[in-house]
Image: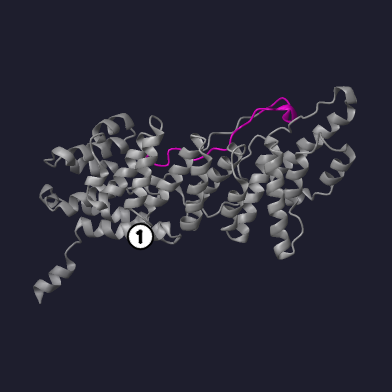
Amino acid sequence: MASAAQAELAPLEPYQMVRSLQLLQDRIADGDHAALPMQRKLIELIDGRLLSTRPSDYEDKRNFRALLVYAMSGGNPRTVASIISKLPLDGTDARISTGIIEYLRGQFGDATNALKDVDPRNIETEVAAFLALVKGSIIASEDPAASLEYLDLARVIGPGTLVEEAALRRSIALAISQSDAERFLRACEQYVRRFLASPYATQFADAFVDGVTGLEANIDLENVAGIIGAMNHEQAKVTYLRLARRAAIDQLTGLLQFARSGLEALAAEVGNEADPRAVLYSTVATVTTEDVDAVRARLESIDSRRLSAGDRMLLDAAFRVLDEVSVLPEARRPPQTPVARPASVEADEELMPLASEPDAETQPALVEPVSVDPPEQDESDAFIADMRSKLQSIDDMLQGPKE
């Protein structure tokens, strides 16, 4: 009886605890937002358990592989580095360990050198998907084609996991950087179908809007409509509004009409009146191309109290452009004068993301939040500021956690 009781009280092996962490992160990928604080607590518990281990504990390869998975799942890099420094590693295990530690330290060049001869397909499944994701990330700028192959491999090895979710988002960012509209749309369709409930879907939303506007000249808007159609009503409305906002400011007439039609169709489904933001965005694009009085009337019909601070800036800028156009002789009136972009055209507080984004402390290392550069300010005159401040798309979401 005493032996049985002692066995029940014995601490779990590291691999057992890390297995629980993986299951928890899979729940997060499926949209279980309540699992986020649980993840943070479990990582703390695992860290404490690892600090109590001895080198002999890692003779069990399950514990060694768990240590690597823990490192790539948001674990404490100092704990991992300290343990690995005491282990007699050689060959592939040594290269993988070095590569992961250098990756967590942000030394991507050293990580690339350490992992260059390591093929994730020849590694145990628990580690392979993470390793493919890491390799795909650290070579993205140097070899985008090879990076995409590794990201696809990560998805194949780890279907339905947080690794696949992160790999898909990274694939979307790479497709945008390579101006590959077909791959961009395919990856977006896969993400919406599989991971739209993920807490990290807000990062996808940023990339989706950025990609559609950036690739507008070559993108199939019917496919875009199909992707948005897979969202629920509120998600679709937010997406169309964000597209309309970007299209109005960037003077993308075709995309603006597409977004406007989508919003009108959504409003008709539920019998709602036109959203004031949609009226604003569609009117902004016509400020210098339609009858001034008609445009002014549409702008004056907008209830500014229903606009966010950023959109009120856009409304004010439109009125200022109208005032300038009204006093210009016809011969001097420019045929097309883009309305100034406000200091920030990020999705504002009323353009809610697809899902609530988790805070930085609860995010796994492989899916860090995007970093947003501070908006540039034009102190002289907002309405003539032609400078285009881009929406920040997915940064290096796979950067290791800050110590």
Q: Nearer the viewer, residue 197 or 8?
A: 197
Q: Quadrant of residue 379?
A: top right
Query: Residue 277 appears at what percent x and percent y?
Result: 72, 49
Q: Quadrant of residue 22?
A: bottom left
Q: Nearer the viewer, residue 339 or 116?
A: 116
Any magenta on residue 395? yes
Residue at the far bottom in the pictured view: 1
Q: How many marks?
A: 1
Q: Residue at x 88, y 31 (%)?
A: 326
Q: Residue at x 49, y 48 (%)?
A: 186
Magenta span of residues: 378-403
14 lies left or right of 218: left
| Residue 401 seen by the camera | no
Residue at the far top in the pictured view: 332
Query: Residue 68 appears at what percent x and percent y?
Result: 24, 47
Query: Residue 233 appears at what percent x and percent y?
Result: 62, 60
Q: Residue at x 52, y 49 (%)?
A: 202
Q: Main secondary structure of the magenta part?
A: loop
Any magenta on residue 74? no
User: Is disc 1 placed on a helix, strand or loop?
Assistant: helix
111 lies left or right of 28: left
Query: Residue 402 appears at what percent x and percent y?
Result: 37, 39
Q: Quadrant of the N terminus?
A: bottom left
User: Where is 261 relative to 396, above or below?
Assistant: below
- The kind of residue tagged 1 is Leu
Tell me if mark 1 has few (under 14), some (14-19) or many (20+) residues whose alpha carbon lies within 10 angstroms of its own: many
268 lies left or right of 230: right
Q: Residue at x 44, y 62 (%)?
A: 34
User: Where is 154 relative to 252, above or below?
Assistant: below
Q: Quadrant of the C terminus?
A: top left
| Residue 296 seen by the camera | yes
Reading the image, the residue beneath label 1 is 24
